[in-house]
Amino acid sequence: MASDDPQAFFGAGRSDKDRYTNPFYNIPLQYMPQSIEGMLLWTEHLLFRNGFFKQAINRVANYFITNIVIECDDEAAKGKYQEALEVLHWRQALGVAGQNLLTFGNEFTTVNQGFTRHLTCPKCRKTTNIDKIKFTFDKGIYMSSCISKSCNYSGKFKCDDMPSRAVEDIHLVHWPAKEIKIRHEDTTGQSEFFWDIPQTYIKKVTSKNDKFFPRKTPAVIYECIQKKAMMAFNPKNFLHLKLDNPTTIRTDGKAIPPAMFMFEDFFMLQTLKRYNEVICFEDISPFRVVSMSSDPNPAVNPFLHQNGGVWAAAVDDMITEHRRDPGAYHKFPFPLNYQQLGGDASKLVPTELIEKAKHDILNALNIPVEMFEMTFQQQAAGPMLRMFENAWSTVPINYNRLLSHIGKVVGSILGLPEAKISLIPITFSDDIERKQVIGQLVSANSIARSELLKLYNFDFEDQLRKKREEERIAKDIDEEEKERDAVANIENQNIMSVLQGNQPAQAPGQGGIAQQAGAGGGTPQDALERAQQLAQQLFPLDGAQRRTELQQIKAQDQDLWASVKAQLEQMTSQAGSQGVQGAKQQAAGPTQ
């Protein structure tokens, strides 16, 4: 036996009494898949059976999704790229791609252009939108009647798909890894990719007289179904992301799922869970037993004087009564034995072994247990995250490849200039010390301000334009305020001019305004004229003097006070209108 044969180890070539069982040929080895297709199926099984595995993969996949940076010289095109990425839900797309990559080791993606389906008459060549024509459908064949008045053809129609340039019609497809077949050349790394169309899908899209799939399923798929062939992918539209494989393992272009390197750990975990399941069924609820109590005195021993069937019936009645009324009192003519068998599941459950198996799997996935359980200590978070990021550096690299691929296809569909689309590096985004250093360098005018803005996903040119726009708006508001103040000053000057021009001169030795109010009487016209005269005298006064004089007039003549107050209000309103009109004329300038 060759020395490099695993069976030659552990005394395999010696006599039977000196041989030991090969520890590598254990139970998990009997179930370990040998083909890549079997590995993918087993990984899918492990994903469904272990929720913590799914959650751990999800956290790693989403940890590296930051914000995107679109570098494009054309601002209008940049906006269209942003719109297209939002329509494609790029964050969710990256998350799904990351989960497929970390779970199955492979991610197969296409960015499909939308289309509108038309049916073409083979006789007159008239093409009609499928939504405007009646048809029957069976196994990929369209049957209809031509709608042209000059053509009476009825029979099989040709299906034509016209590409759509609408952003909302672009669709991102994540293909199941187990359905993709690869023709791979190892020495050059060249590959061709095919979709092995599953029978369940074929049956669904070829159902007779269905009205949905004949409108939405691409024509190339129907062609492949009719030819019973796999569908070849367009290399310009197809992207294969994969994790690295050990070079000694040949998998024909596909990557080995990471879970396969932990197959024995998953097997051990499942064995413990199976054992735990048995404990849950058998040992959580105790098995309760009621029996006759033995007595050493044969004269009173119930085994000798009681019928077993009658005794069992009496115990059953007692149990039934207790369930109906737990507070009831029960009588029995002799002692009973009561036992609880089992019920010690808490002592038997292998909790520590299960947790250890989970931790072994998480460590094998390069996922810190503290990160998964959200128990990070601040002192250790920085170095631990840095090690985690380096261990999974391939994830953001593949994300950037996917974004670049999406941008290339979307740009080709929409006719846009090339753009570079990528994620902000997670280390740069979260490194607090680096941000502080860059902030200090920017404050010292040692480096460009754009370096600091990049850390927070701000575009320098865009922010500069916004800042200039804010400065312009602030300047316009300041000018409006100045114009408003100037108009108000002009109004006040005009009001004062009007008031000073209408102010009556007071004769020397003449008494106060309130004293003149008492000298009156006569007709109502005389009272009105006197009120107007008093109002003209009171109007130029300041507020305090005016109120004092009005109080004195009110004390002498209530009617005269009311009339004077009404005249003052009318004069205030007129003066304001005249002032505004004068200000407008002055602001308008002299007319030609």
Image (cartoon, rainbow, N blue to C red):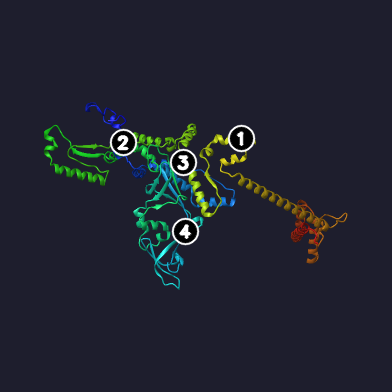
The image quarter containing residue 561 is bottom right
Label 4: state its secondary structure. strand
- First in sequence: mark 2 vs mark 4: 4
Give the farthest residue toward the right: 508
145 is higher (above) or lower (below) than 213: below
Mark 2, Cα crowd under 10 Å, few <14 / some 14-19 / many 20+, is many
Q: CA distance from mark 2 to mark 4?
A: 58 Å
Graded by Cα atoms within 10 Å as few (under 14), some (14 to 19) or many (20 or more), the crowding at tag 4 reads: some
Q: Which residue is mark 4?
A: 115
Q: Is residue 317 above or below residue 144?
A: above
Quadrant occupied by the C terminus: bottom right
Question: Measured from the top left, where is residue 397 in percent x and y?
Answer: 48, 41
Q: Position of residue 499 (x, y in %)?
A: 80, 56
Report the residue marked by disc 1.
440
Q: Which mark is residue 395?
A: 3
In this figure, which residue is indicated by the disc labeled 2?
349
**Residue lying at 59% horizontally and 39% vertically, measured from the top left:** 452
Amino acid carrying mark 3 in the image: Val
Q: Nearer the viewer, mark 1 or mark 4?
A: 4
Closer to the eye: label 2 or 4: 4
Please name the amino acid that badge 2 sits on: Val
